[in-house]
Image: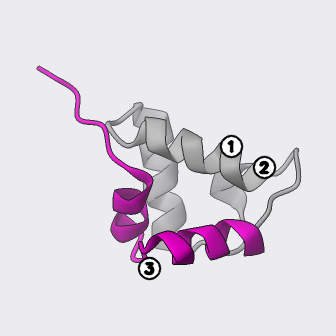
Amino acid sequence: MEATFHSLENLFLQLGLDNEPDAIDAFIRENKLEQDEALVDAPFWTPSQAAFIEECLNDDSDWAEVVDQLNVLLHE
């Protein structure tokens, strides 16, 4: 079975967030994380968003790569 890879725009859509490029840039600018802060524990997620992120990472799902990308962007 071939894996599906998702874009950052699709991840934002999946999380129920505005997925326009300017909105994504603003979200990343406004929600920086401390180096030791886990993405899943970020205070800005709703419980369902955090659960989705945690599931993606724990299951190494098709979404894991783009979730990792968001993690890096929020820690820069």
Query: Vertically, is 18 above or below 1?
Result: below
Q: Verify CB contact (< 8 Å) between mark 1 and mark 2.
A: yes
SS type, badge 2: helix
| Residue sitting nearer the eye, 15 or 7 | 7
Question: Tag 1: residue type?
Answer: Val
Question: Tag 2: residue type?
Answer: His
Query: Vertically, is 62 above or below 74?
Result: above
Answer left or right for 9 relative to 74: left
Residue in the picture at 87% in, 45% down: 36
Residue in the picture at 44% in, 79% down: 18
Per the image, the residue denoted by label 2 is: 75
Q: Which span is picked out in magenta?
A: 1-30
Q: Earlier in the sequence, mark 1 or mark 3?
A: 3
SS type, badge 1: helix
Residue 59 falls in image quadrant: top left
Answer left or right for 20 relative to 29: left
Q: Quadrant of the N terminus?
A: top left
| Label 1, label 2: how far apart the Cα atoms are | 5 Å
Image coordinates for residue 55, horizontal then vertical, percent = 43, 46
| Label 1, label 3: how far apart the Cα atoms are | 19 Å
Q: Which mark is residue 18?
A: 3
Q: Verify CB contact (< 8 Å) between mark 3 and mark 2.
A: no
Answer left or right for 22 relative to 7: right
Q: Earlier in the sequence, mark 3 or mark 2?
A: 3
Q: How many marks?
A: 3
In reply to whether residue 2 is colored magenta, the answer given is: yes
